[in-house]
Image: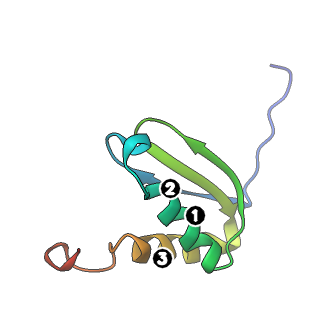
């Protein structure tokens, strides 16, 4: 490795859970929510337990709130569908 590039103008938003790749609709819910909020995704990474999106740092908080609302995490646990 000859050089390292560091960026401090990005935010990472991740949805984490066992078997993430096999749970139908998780990626769609994530990407649709961000698109509807007009949040541009710079890059996407996936693993068996996580889907992560890199967004502009300025949109990081909005992206977090948007994703939490999309998955019902803005409600108490006993009120989630």
In the shown orientation, is residue 40 left or right of residue 25? right
Mark 1 and mark 2 in contact (Cβ < 8 Å)? yes
Please tell me which of labels 3 and 1 falls first in the chain: 1
C-alpha span from label 3 to label 1: 14 Å
Quadrant that contains the N terminus? top right
Q: Nearer the viewer, residue 56 or 32?
A: 32
Circle 2 or circle 3, nearest the eye = 2
Badge 3: how crowded within 10 Å, few (<14), some, or many (20+)?
few
Circle 3 or circle 1, nearest the eye = 1
Numbered circles on residues, count? 3
Query: Residue lying farthest left?
Result: 78
Residue 73 is situated, as x and y percent measured from the top left of the image, at 32, 72
Mark 1 and mark 3 in contact (Cβ < 8 Å)? no
Q: Residue at x 44, y 41 (%)?
A: 21
Q: Which residue is mark 3?
A: 65
Residue 45 is situated, as x and y percent measured from the top left of the image, at 60, 43
Query: Residue lying farthest top?
Result: 1
Rendered position, 16 above or below 68: above
Q: Residue at x 31, y 41 (%)?
A: 18
Quadrant that contains the C terminus? bottom left
Mark 3 and mark 2 in contact (Cβ < 8 Å)? no
Residue 27 is tagged as: 2
Q: Residue at x 50, y 56 (%)?
A: 27
Residue 25 is situated, as x and y percent measured from the top left of the image, at 43, 58
C-alpha span from label 2 to label 1: 6 Å
In the shown orientation, is residue 58 left or right of residue 80? right
Q: Secondary structure at mark 3?
A: helix
C-alpha span from label 2 to label 3: 17 Å
Q: Nearer the viewer, residue 3 or 14?
A: 14
Query: Residue lying farthest right?
Result: 2
Q: Which residue is mark 1?
A: 31
Residue 7 is tagged as: none
């Amino acid at each position: 490795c000859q050089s390292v590039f560091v960026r401090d103008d990005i935010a990472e938003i991740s949805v984490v859970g066992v078997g993430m790749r096999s749970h139908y609709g998780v990626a769609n819910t994530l990407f649709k929510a961000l698109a509807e909020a007009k949040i541009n995704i710079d890059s996407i990474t996936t693993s068996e337990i996580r889907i992560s999106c890199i967004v502009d740092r300025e949109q990081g908080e909005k992206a977090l709130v948007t994703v939490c609302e999309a998955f019902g995490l803005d409600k108490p646990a006993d009120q989630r569908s």
